[in-house]
Image: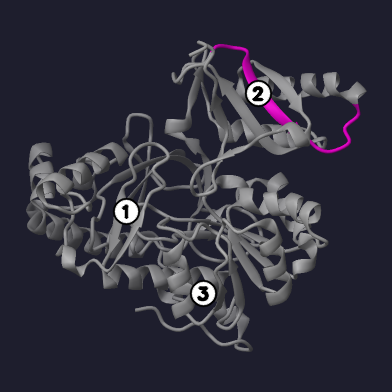
Amino acid sequence: MALPLRKAGENMMQANLHQPELEHLAGEALRDHQLVKLRAQLLRVYRDSPYYRDKFDAAGVDPLRFQGWEDYARYPFFDKEEERLSQERSREVMGHPFGMHVTCDVRDINRVSASSGTTGAPTYIGYTENDRAVSQDHVARMMARAGLVRGDRVLFAGVMSMWIVGIPAVDALLNLGFCVIPIGGLATTERFAQTAIDTRPDMMMCTPSYALHLIKSVPQKTRWRTEEFGIRKLIVFGEPGGGIPEIREQLSAGFGGAEIYDMSGGTGCTNPLGLSCEAHNGIHVFGNDNALMEILDQELNPLPIENGVEGEVVFTGLVKECQPLIRWRDKDLIRVFTDPCPCRRPGPRIEFRGRIDDMLLVKGVNVFPNAVRDVVAASSDLVGGDIQILRYSASAVVEAPVDVEICLKPGVAVETRARLAQELEAAIQNKLRFRARVHLVEPGDFSMEYGATGKAKLVRTIDRSGA
């Protein structure tokens, strides 16, 4: 169970880490700690889950004979499609939606979250009492690293539904003694602004897209500006905007100089798992004692976790009781940094590079929408961070030149736009090695689509068949 956060006025250097003895684990000490938990988890799921027993037997691996890390590299992966099929099957034969891979008594599940279902049917994530306690401990670690203490007012502006960063985060914040203002992410701009003005929150949590929306819409629809809310800190999640310098600067300026922190989690483990720092030098992973992180190359072979390594991240929940996902492929590409951070906080740092399932293929070149957005935002002060890549079929293969709509900042002179489009096309060509056709769009005409959890959709499929 998580310990209570320190009260206001206590030594903030001590408050930087909530579990210093665990968060400082590194090197062989961390690997030994993880190996003990991993061996116990593999034995537990093999014993308690016929699904995992059959899965491991089919792969020719046996937890009873588990020797170490070389053995683990032979264990099978888990992914979203397998999870979906497992949950479809459990609804048919077991009468519950938690999957055939559930490893606890379903009557011990006392909270359920769900994916957004934007890429298919939603999947359901169950938590036992202990799972919730681990998650709460990680929230305590996150808040301590952000310099927040019990009693601080937190305006929670994420989607207050079954999303994993919705009610679960609010539960943890309440239990840790924060003053939570759960306005959610679906309130009208007018109601949001009035609430923020009245309650004067110390911190806000939301997606970066929603925060950018507020910066624009609050002065349009109310007599206030977001700078007047008095928010000192902003924790963003759900999409990689908080790790993009140009977007981070817009967020900080829009909220009166607020410090911006980027949060990440790990499906199948617990949330949160990491938070960026004031140095904006990547996301520090602070949950290594409970979550095993692997980095894989394109052939799905493990890579050493060392400074600069880049590949697909895979997580295993070392202590998850309900539905632990062994070697979960979340399809995120990351870069790892292990050199010392100026903030002096421990833990490897990660930087998200894109998603495998968002990838487009243009004349043999892998194109990640996030990378296009990053290049555009860094190439000119006349555009913001909003883009839409247009494709004309459901295929990941896109013909060049790729149509890219880019939102202008207000007041860009008409006579400069042709040159600006050429500069952006050249930047994309030089840095990402594919040919783009840029369409500059006025702010009032640019339409950004969002998923159910507030994540911006950077690719729009257009049907040219006339159907």
Instruction: State the residue at coordinates (54%, 79%).
Output: 178
Name the image quarter holding residue 227: bottom right
Say which element carries label 2: strand
Instruction: State the residue at coordinates (25%, 49%).
Output: 326
Label 2 with label 1: CB-CB less than 8 Å: no
Crowding at dot 1, Cα within 10 Å, few <14 / some 14-19 / many 20+, comes out as many
Instruction: State the residue at coordinates (83%, 61%).
Output: 223
Residue at mark 1: 268
Whole-percent x, y for residue 434 in the image? 61, 18
Viewer-nearest of labels 2 and 3?
Answer: 2
Label 2 with label 3: CB-CB less than 8 Å: no
Q: Which circle's residue, 2 or 3, is located before the other in the chain? A: 3
Q: Is residue 409 magenta?
A: yes
Horizontal placement of 206 versus 66: left or right? Answer: right
Q: Is residue 75 magenta?
A: no
Say which element carries label 1: loop
Viewer-nearest of labels 3 and 1?
Answer: 1
Residue at mark 2: 404
Up the image or down, 321 lies above or below 180; here it is: above
Residue at mark 3: 17
Q: Which one is in front, 186 or 260? A: 186
Crowding at dot 3, Cα within 10 Å, few <14 / some 14-19 / many 20+, comes out as many
Q: Which mark is residue 175?
A: none
Q: Which one is in front, 93 or 290? A: 93
Residue at mark 2 to residue at mark 3: CA–CA distance: 43 Å
Q: What kind of residue is marked 3?
A: Leu
Q: What kind of residue is marked 2?
A: Val
Q: What kind of residue is marked 1?
A: Gly
Do we see residue 256 in this rendering?
Answer: no
